[in-house]
Amino acid sequence: MRRVGTDNCFVTSQNHGFAVDSNTLPADWEPLFVNMNDGTNEGIRHKTKPYFSAQFHPEASSGPRDTEFLFDEFIALLK
């Protein structure tokens, strides 16, 4: 999976039978992560509000700390 707008890629497990179609997102939302294998959406974020989501488990394997930064970003949004 790749974080949109960066070259940062992460190994995550994809275990879902559906995904958000990035083409149907309202104007104030944008893709945050994209699956490099099939191009499916793996996360979205709001363009102006402190909301984001992930379609994977950032606390799980493969390397359990690979996407741990998402928790830090979430905590920073609470301040």
Image (tube, rainbow, N blue to C red):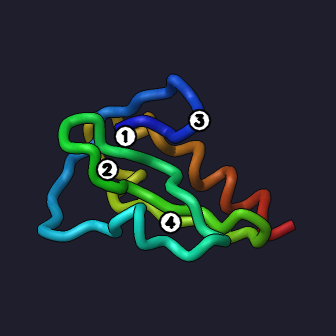
Label 2, label 1: how far apart the Cα atoms are = 5 Å
Extreme residue toward the right, this view: 79
Residue that carries the numbered disc 2 in the rendered image: 60
Query: Mark 2 touching mark 1, by CB under 8 A?
Result: yes
User: In percent of the image, x 44 and y 60: which residue is there?
Assistant: 54
User: In percent of the image, x 42 and y 28: which residue is there?
Assistant: 9
Dot 3: what SS? Answer: loop
Q: Residue 34 location, x and y as percent?
A: 38, 45
Dot 1: what SS? Answer: loop
Q: Residue 7 location, x and y as percent?
A: 51, 23
Label 1, label 3: how far apart the Cα atoms are = 23 Å
Badge 3 amino acid: Gly
Q: Residue 50 location, x and y as percent?
A: 74, 69
Residue that carries the numbered disc 3 in the rendered image: 5
Of pointers 2 and 3, the one earlier in the residue sequence: 3
Residue that carries the numbered disc 4 in the rendered image: 53
